Image (spheres, helix red, strand yellow):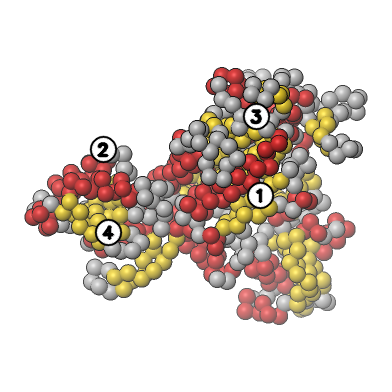
């Protein structure tokens, strides 16, 4: 599939999300707000199902008495829910206050701001058209927040050419990031929304944390921050959980919650947003077994997405190169998905699984850490030789009453985005095929092939006609499914083929039709969304049959 085809596919997906009530632009009636999104009725159900599937698979259904396949030992999993606003010292000791920054560049003419590493470009030579005619050839680095199609569009605009003349553009080299262009050459850089070269500023740091104020005075001393991740709430409560819950290592502490990052250039629908939801596990273990646990969680989390319907062809598990690793990391792997807004062969991060060593607990014990001259972690000092940011001073070590050892646990962190996972499941589910309409004519059918566990609506009940006892029996079936806790729809409007198509487009796995056979011999027709197979089932067995299918 070409980049153009993939872009068209993404446009169709975004359109369906709005049309069917999955995702809306935040504050749309006021023009919207970049980087923020609202979930409609179906999107809310879908995202909740994604969260619930994660929580059930990681915590609720976890058996702490037996080791799962591939795990070095049996272990416990518990949940917490911590605050969005924490003591500012948390972010200083964790390193976010100083290091949670992106480089940005501003365009002095377009009055827009871009994340430095999101701007790509390519060198090109051409003549610009003006009222006086063509100028002498100029060599410029034309940029865009995107890849070659967007860069080409910007080049055509810069040189005053129509789209059909794209083959006249004389490119040099390949597409590279703006980060590879020396600042001394910025006078030849055409910004993503600029009409002239040389309008971009030099890159500078931009802190991604949202500031807020606690209390009524509003002084600098009252400054706090919305959390940029949920992980720190788990780390600062590690001792509380161990002391209050009688849990032992190995131990996973889990949390689902909102986080906030003031992204410079939020983009690609809900993929990069300023408000998002995380599903995080901090898995605490002995240092000697940490590498085994890292391998276990990396493989398990990759398999989770496949188990919920992501095709292996669209998913990769990418181990980070040494130069990519954070200074404290003993290893990191990203689970990445081939989102349609990316070019073929490119992948976007769904989840990171990081081996963080003892960095986090030590930081909150001792103060902000850094790599010392000997390559080991040590407390970072200020110009006076004192700890730059003091830790809590609390003992966050763990005592193993079996081995009689005391140590600072190592941490494995599988960190998933609920919004990114939801978007991936939406993209993976979108499918077009040909199916007969009410008159037997083959028509294009849009189907959202959600895995039944995450489908917003599990089944829909249709009375074939609005008479002859059909509605009464349909309501009976509908209420039986509702009473069993199954999210079910009732639709009596329009031809039966149109009703099927409406449910296909929102991803409902099964449609249940009450017809003449229901009144005569007590059977209903269950139609499968994907195979289009139709089977007869007794009315009294419908609920049990849907439950069975959901549990397959």
In the displayed structure, 399 sits above or below 445; it is above
Cα separation, mark 1 vs mark 3, equals: 21 Å
In the displayed structure, 76 sits above or below 23; it is above
Depth check, mark 4 against mark 1: the one in front is: 1
Circle 4 Cα neighbour tier, 10 Å, few/some/many (<14 / 14–19 / ≥20): many
Residue 418 visible, this angle: yes
Earlier-in-chain disc, 2 versus 1 = 1
Label at residue 232: none
- Local secondary structure at mark 1: strand
In this figure, which residue is indicated by the disc labeled 3? 235
Earlier-in-chain disc, 2 versus 4 = 2
In this figure, which residue is indicated by the disc labeled 4? 527
In this figure, which residue is indicated by the disc labeled 2? 483
Residue 132 visible, this angle: no
Identify the image quadrant of residue 502.
bottom left
**Left or right: 29 in relation to 389:** left
- Local secondary structure at mark 3: helix
- Residue at screen point 41% across, 58% down: 449
- Residue at screen point 73% across, 39% down: 100
Q: Please state the horizontal and vertical placement of residue 24, each as a whole percent of the image.
A: 47, 49
Circle 1 Cα neighbour tier, 10 Å, few/some/many (<14 / 14–19 / ≥20): many
In the displayed structure, 287 sits above or below 306; it is above
- Local secondary structure at mark 4: strand
- Local secondary structure at mark 2: helix
Give the quarter of the figure containing the N terminus. Answer: bottom right
Cα separation, mark 2 vs mark 1, equals: 43 Å
Q: Mark 3–mark 2 contact, CB under 8 Å?
A: no
Label at residue 333: 1
Q: Mark 4–mark 1 contact, CB under 8 Å?
A: no
Q: Please state the horizontal and vertical placement of residue 366, each as a whole percent of the image.
A: 77, 25
């Amino acid at each position: 599939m070409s980049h153009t085809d993939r872009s068209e596919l993404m446009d169709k997906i975004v359109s369906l999300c709005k049309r069917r009530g999955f995702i809306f632009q935040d504050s749309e009636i006021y023009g919207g707000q970049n980087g923020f999104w609202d979930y409609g009725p179906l999107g809310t159900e879908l995202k909740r199902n994604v969260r619930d599937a994660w929580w059930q698979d990681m915590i609720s259904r976890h058996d702490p008495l037996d080791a799962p396949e591939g795990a070095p030992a049996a272990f416990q999993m518990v949940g917490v829910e911590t605050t969005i606003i924490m003591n500012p010292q948390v972010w200083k000791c964790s390193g976010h206050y100083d290091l949670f920054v992106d480089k940005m560049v501003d365009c002095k003419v377009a009055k827009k701001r871009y994340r430095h590493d999101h701007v790509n470009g390519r060198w090109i030579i051409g003549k610009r058209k003006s009222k006086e005619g063509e100028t002498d050839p100029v060599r410029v680095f034309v940029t865009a927040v995107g890849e070659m199609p967007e860069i080409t569009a910007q080049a055509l605009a810069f040189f005053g050419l129509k789209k059909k003349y794209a083959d006249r553009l004389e490119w040099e080299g390949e597409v590279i990031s703006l980060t590879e262009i020396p600042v001394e050459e910025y006078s030849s850089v055409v910004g993503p929304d600029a009409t002239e070269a040389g309008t971009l500023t030099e890159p500078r740091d931009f802190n991604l944390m949202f500031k807020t104020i606690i209390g009524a005075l509003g002084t600098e001393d009252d400054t706090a921050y919305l959390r940029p991740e949920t992980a720190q709430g788990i780390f600062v409560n590690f001792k509380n959980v161990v002391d209050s819950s009688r849990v032992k290592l190995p131990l996973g502490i889990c949390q689902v919650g909102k986080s906030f990052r003031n992204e410079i250039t939020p983009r690609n629908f809900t993929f990069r947003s300023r408000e998002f939801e995380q599903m995080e596990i901090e898995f605490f273990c002995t240092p000697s077994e940490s590498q085994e646990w890292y391998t276990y969680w990396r493989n398990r989390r990759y398999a989770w997405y496949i188990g919920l319907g992501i095709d292996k062809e669209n998913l990769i598990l990418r181990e980070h190169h040494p130069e990519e690793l954070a200074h404290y990391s003993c290893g990191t792997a990203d689970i990445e998905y081939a989102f349609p807004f990316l070019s073929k062969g490119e992948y976007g991060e769904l989840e990171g699984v990081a081996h963080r060593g003892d960095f986090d607990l030590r930081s909150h014990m001792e103060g902000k850490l850094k790599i010392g001259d000997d390559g080991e972690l040590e407390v970072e000092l200020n110009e006076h030789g004192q700890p730059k940011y003091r830790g809590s001073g609390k003992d966050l070590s763990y005592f193993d009453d079996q081995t009689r050892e005391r140590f600072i646990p190592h941490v494995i962190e599988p960190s998933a985005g609920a919004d990114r996972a939801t978007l991936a499941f939406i993209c993976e589910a979108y499918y077009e095929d040909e199916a007969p309409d009410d008159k037997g004519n083959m028509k294009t059918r849009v189907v959202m092939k959600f895995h039944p566990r995450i489908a917003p609506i599990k089944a829909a009940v249709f009375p074939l006609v609005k008479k002859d006892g059909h509605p009464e029996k349909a309501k009976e079936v509908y209420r039986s499914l509702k009473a069993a806790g199954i999210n079910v729809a009732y639709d009596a409007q329009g031809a039966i083929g149109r009703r099927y198509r409406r449910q296909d487009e929102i991803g409902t796995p099964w449609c249940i039709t009450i017809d003449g056979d229901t009144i005569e011999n007590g059977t209903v027709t269950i139609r499968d969304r994907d195979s289009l197979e139709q089977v007869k089932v007794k009315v009294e067995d419908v609920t049990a049959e849907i439950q069975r299918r959901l549990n397959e």
